[in-house]
Image: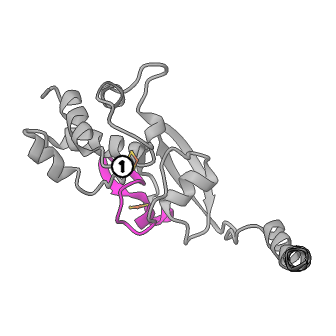
Amino acid sequence: MAEQDESVSWTLTRRAFVGTTAVGGLAVAAPLAACAQLGPAEPEPDTTVTLAINGVKKSVAVDTRTSLLDMLRERLDLTGTKKGCNQGACGACTVLLDGRRINSCLTLAVMHEGAELTTIEGLAKGDRLHPLQQAFIDRDAFQCGYCTSGQIVSGVGCIAEGHTSSPGEIREWMSGNICRCGAYTNITEAVAQAAGKA
Ligand code: FES
Ligand code: FES
């Protein structure tokens, strides 16, 4: 008898719980659905910036507060450049601006009128990978891949700067690019391979 009571009691409790959750869930879901329809607050473009992106001149409508990274990802669908920290700490957003490595999350798009920008999408020539892209495959230099485009673009800059005389020098000059998977040894080998040092 005691068992039956316990069972009934449990059933009622469970039903009450499910009912409460369903009602509560609906109460929460309605405003959430309304928010989802509104979508993220995307600032309206109020100016235009013209740059050469991967060799192609483009004029892009942006808000003056739009970062270079958001312009690439949100306005041009160039999503190979990743947003990691969005505050200059991880290097996932690295691009080459007039040949120099920069964190695209830390700079405004409107500051770069007339600049030449190279992103990960601009490294391969048709079906032919950039030597550093090939080296990343050869050396198994990634795991989840989230940091990889930033690592490769940064590695291209590192090689062009000539900071590849030793594994230690490569590690030092690639230290702005964080890999949460810890693929550093293979990344260093890949950069050395593309630089002709391994
Ligand atoms: Fe730019 Fe992390 S997203 S440095
Ligand atoms: Fe996963 Fe670098 S491969 S963060």
Label 1 CB-ligand 2 distance < 8 A: yes
Amino acid type of the residue tagged 1 in the rendering: Cys
Instruction: From the top left corner, tell me how far across and down residue 174 is, in percent.
Output: 23, 50
Q: Is residue 14 visible?
A: no
Q: Secondary structure at mark 1?
A: loop
Please say if 49 is above or below 197: below
Q: Which residues are magenta?
A: 86-111
Q: Crowdedness of circle 1 by 10 Å Cα count: few (<14), some, many (20+)?
A: few
Quarter of the image for the N terminus: give it.
bottom right
Q: Nearer the viewer, residue 115 or 193?
A: 193
Q: Is residue 59 visible?
A: yes
Give the side of residue 19 with respect to residue 113, left or right: right
Instruction: From the top left corner, tell me how far across and down residue 122 is, in percent.
Output: 45, 35
Residue occupied by mark 1: 181
In the rendered structure, does residue 101 fall within the stretch colored magenta?
A: yes
Q: Is the image coloured rainbow, by chain, by secondary structure, or in one colour?
A: one colour
Instruction: From the top left corner, tell me how far across and down residue 179 is, in percent.
Output: 34, 51
Instruction: From the top left corner, tell me how far across and down residue 44 is, in percent.
Output: 70, 69
Q: Nearer the viewer, residue 162 or 58?
A: 162
Query: Extreme left residue here?
Result: 165
Q: Which quadrant holds residue 136? A: top left
Query: Extreme top residue here?
Result: 127
